[in-house]
Image (cartoon, rainbow, N blue to C red):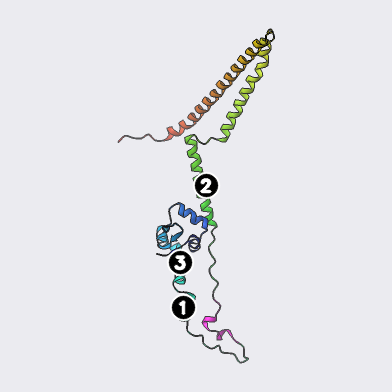
Amino acid sequence: MTAVSKKDFAELYGCGKPYVSQLVKDGRLVLTEDGRQVEVEKSFELLGVTSDPSKAGVRERWAAYRAGSEAPGTATAAAMPPAAPIAQGEAGQLTLDDLPAAAAPSAPAEAPRSTAYHDARTMREQAQARMAQIELGKQLGTVLDAETTLRAVMDAHVAARAEIMKLPDRLAQLVAPQSNPRACFEIIRAECERACQRMVDAARGLANAEQLAQANAAAPAAESQPAEVPA
């Protein structure tokens, strides 16, 4: 089995190196023991290159690569017959008919296939995996919805402000008749504790209301699923 680097495999397969990295991550390539190179034949079998008619270009590039690695260019040149002498026309100039076949201009090499499709597919698969992680986090309670969380914070802030703004009216009536500073301090502290407790109760009420709303939203989805029939 022949092993090549990941960069060379990307050129053979006609894709970008990020897509090769994604194939490795998905377990769709066979690597060497050190994990640095790709075993081409086994990877092609795993990807279905050998049986896919649309992968003919991949097979041709691999055949050319393997032939070049097994036989250097000097062997190809040695195997070619010696060029025939070039005949000249009457005016001493060469004509196209006089050129040997080996000297004729070769057809332009096939341009490498664009990797934009592979890059786009890699980005799409990564985005789908990211969205799946976010949904899992929501189900586990480790990820919060930004809009819902912001609304809960604003509601808690409004409730806390309302409780704080009630303190001056209550404290003015309670502290005014007092002449002992210690008594004034105890009254103010007791009212602050009551205000804090009311804010905690309000926050708990908002949390319970949010949980109830989420449960009601999930109930129709659960009812729409068919019930399991016991065997």
Q: Residues within 10 Å of mark 1 (few under 14, many from 20)?
A: few
Amino acid type, label 3: Trp
Q: Which residues are magenta?
A: 94-106
Q: How far across and down, in percent of the image, does residue 26 sit?
A: 45, 52
Mark 1 secondary-structure assignment: helix
Residue located at (43% from left, 33% from top): 222
Residue 200: mark: none
In this view of the protein, which residue sits in the foreground, 42 or 33?
33
Disc 1/disc 2 C-alpha distance (Å):
49 Å
- Residue marked by disc 2: 127
Residue 62: mark: 3
Quadrant housing the N terminus: bottom left
Disc 2/disc 3 C-alpha distance (Å):
32 Å
Is 96 a magenta residue? Answer: yes
Q: In the displayed structure, does residue 173 sit left or right of residue 212?
A: right
Is 35 a magenta residue? Answer: no
Amino acid type, label 2: Ala
- Residue marked by disc 1: 75
Residue located at (46% from left, 78% from top): 75
Task: Tell me which label, 1 or 3, sits earlier in the chain.
Answer: 3
